[in-house]
Image: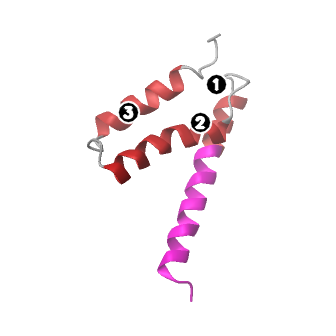
Amino acid sequence: MPSAADVRQNEKCVTTIEMVGDLERGKNGGELRDDTDPELLNDSIFGAIYYRLLLQSGPLTRRFGEELVEQVLRGNRAGRG
């Protein structure tokens, strides 16, 4: 029987794979620039979230999440130089 830590780690890996897959599909579908690195983009989003969690630098609100994703994706949308 796997430990709780193993289950959490597995869930994190699955979530990361799914998120990177979503970003890869956006890139392949022309929504994101061709030079977008989906893994780096995912890290950019989640890095800010973990920063707030670990350092308690601000609240984790829906508004923060929406603005964060918009800000990170803005520079990676197709049609941008």
Spatial CA distance of label 1 from label 3 is 17 Å
Q: Which residue is mark 3?
A: 66
User: What numbered label is drawn on residue 41?
Assistant: 2
Query: Is there a contact, CB below 8 Å, between mark 1 and mark 3?
Result: no
User: Residue 26: where, in percent of width, then height?
Assistant: 64, 32
- Magenta span has 44? no
| Mark 1: secondary structure | loop
Pointer 1: what residue? 32
Going from the N terminus, do you reach mark 1 or mark 2 first?
1
Question: Taking 6 as reference, is 45 above or below it?
Answer: above
Residue at 62% over, 24% down:
31
- Position of the N terminus, as image quadrant, is bottom right
Q: Are marks 1 and 2 in contact (CB under 8 Å)?
A: yes
Q: Residue at x 59, y 52 (%)?
A: 16
- Badge 2: residue crowd in 10 Å (few <14, some 14–19, many ≥20): some
Q: Going from the N terminus, do you reach mark 2 or mark 3 first?
A: 2
What is the span of residues highlighted in magenta in the rendered image?
1-20
Residue beneath the point at 63% across and 53% down: 17
Q: How many marks?
A: 3
Find residue 62 and report its horizontal and vertical position in percent. Answer: 30, 39
Q: Which residue type does callout 3 highlight?
A: Glu
Query: What whole-number distance in Å separates the C-alpha atoms at marks 1 and 2?
Result: 11 Å
